[in-house]
Image: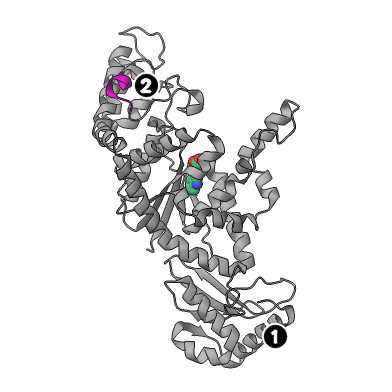
Amino acid sequence: MSIQRVLTGITTSGTPHLGNYVGSVRPSVRMSLRSGVQSFYFLADYHALIKVGDPARVQRSTLEIAATWLACGLDPDKVTFYRQSDIPEIPELTWLLTCVTGKGLLNRAHAYKASVDKNTATGTEPDHGVTAGLFMYPVLMAADILMFNAHQVPVGRDQIQHIEMARDIAASFNHLYGEHFTLPEAVIEEHVATLPGLDGRKMSKSYDNTIALFAPKDQLRRLIMGILTDSRAPGEPKSTEGSALFQLYQAFASTEETAALAKAYAEGIAWGEAKQLLFEHLEREIAPMRAVYDELIQNPAQIEKILKAGAEKARCVATPFTAGLRHAVGLRALDSSRSGGPVAQNAKTAVPSFKQYRERDGQFYFKLLDAQGELLLQSQGFSNPRDAAQSIARLRRDGMAALDTLVEQLTTRADTARVQAALEQLAASQEATGSA
Ligand code: TRP
């Protein structure tokens, strides 16, 4: 099976809690250890600016989240672990994508619509308090994903629409400029639990009911003792259904241990005793990671170094890829060859076309299609998009003369007359439109 690229981002706007750990960190770290997977994990600090206006909090959260992922076993040698704002190509791609994104598409984004609906309900101006950043959120997220041609994006359910938008945006770009982007898919972990918080509602910062993942041991015990239960006395049978305590325990215990607790519930275990059991289980899993976390937090320079190395690794992909995209849209050195790279086609005037694209194997390819879309030339894979673009440029410029020198790069070649006709037609249409 070909390598699957998996990518996910974590907004640096808070302190990781048990819900983040069970729902995102733990499954992601496990996934990153599988073979046949190339993983990209990043700290979405540009996204944080949309919600957080407090610089110290953004910085602190970035440190805490980076330390959390490392403490939970993410191996920066095995995955690409970086900070979004260390990759200047991300905002650059955001702009290229912005220019092919329908405003109407963004109008339909759930988060934006929720703000508008709230304003409308209170008779306020619809966009009151809405920044352009909130409105553009899905485009920035699309740039995160498309930059690395991710196949799979593990996210929570609330993010599915954003992945669909990334697909739409990628398809618009590909349609206009050739096949540059892989269409990503959301991966929803079906069997990871949504953890309840201290009050029984979903554990969430917005409900203020969270248990910090790396709260000191004493504080962890105190928080657990404060979990809401009903008033059944010791000895009275208790129901596991709807018991936050039980669900939390289940997320950290084996099947047998969970069954044993269910039995204890039926037999009337005292709440205090059940809470003590939960505390011990949590502590068993968390304590070793907390030790690493505490040490990392004391050492921001070490984390900074890891992130900088990760950014370098990420930019080995992002820099050449963005160069190819710049070329594709026409942001080119003025003395570079007049043509080259796929040219936007007017659908009404059917002409042959070059397509440049990236395959699942990570290699860059080009092909020449005739006006009816039939394959005339197919290239081998290139490790670098510029090599593919250069061959296209030579074919455009020198026509059949270039073809003879490029035979070794081609895996498919239709008969000479058809290829020649197509190359001549292309040259003619460029003269006519003056496209460069
Ligand atoms: N929006 C995501 C969240 O809040 C975070 C995020 C930003 C992200 N960029 C991404 C997730 C790219 C996956 C892929 O959860």
The answer to whether residue 179 is seen in the rendering is no
Identity of the residue drawn at 57% across and 54% down: 94
Amino acid at pointer 2: Leu
Q: Earlier in the sequence, mark 2 or mark 1?
A: 2
Most extreme residue toward the top, as rendered?
233
Tell which of 173 and 231 is nearer to you.
173
Identity of the residue drawn at 48% across and 71% down: 385
What quarter of the picture does the C terminus occupy? bottom right
Residue 367 vertical placement versus 135 (above, below): below
Q: Residue 300 carries which label?
A: none
Identity of the residue drawn at 34% across and 38% down: 68
Q: Residues within 10 Å of mark 2 (few under 14, many from 20)?
A: many
Q: Quadrant of residue 309?
A: bottom left
- Left or right, residue 229 beside residue 52: left
Q: Tell me the residue that label 1 is attached to.
A: 428
Q: In which quarter of the image is residue 66?
A: top left
Residue 242 vertical placement versus 298 (above, below): above
Question: Is residue 216 one of those drawn in magenta?
Answer: yes
How far across and how far down the image is residue 350, in percent?
A: 71, 77
Start-end of magenta stretch: 215-221
Mark 2 against mark 1, which lies toward the viewer? 1
Q: Tell me the residue that label 2 is attached to.
A: 245
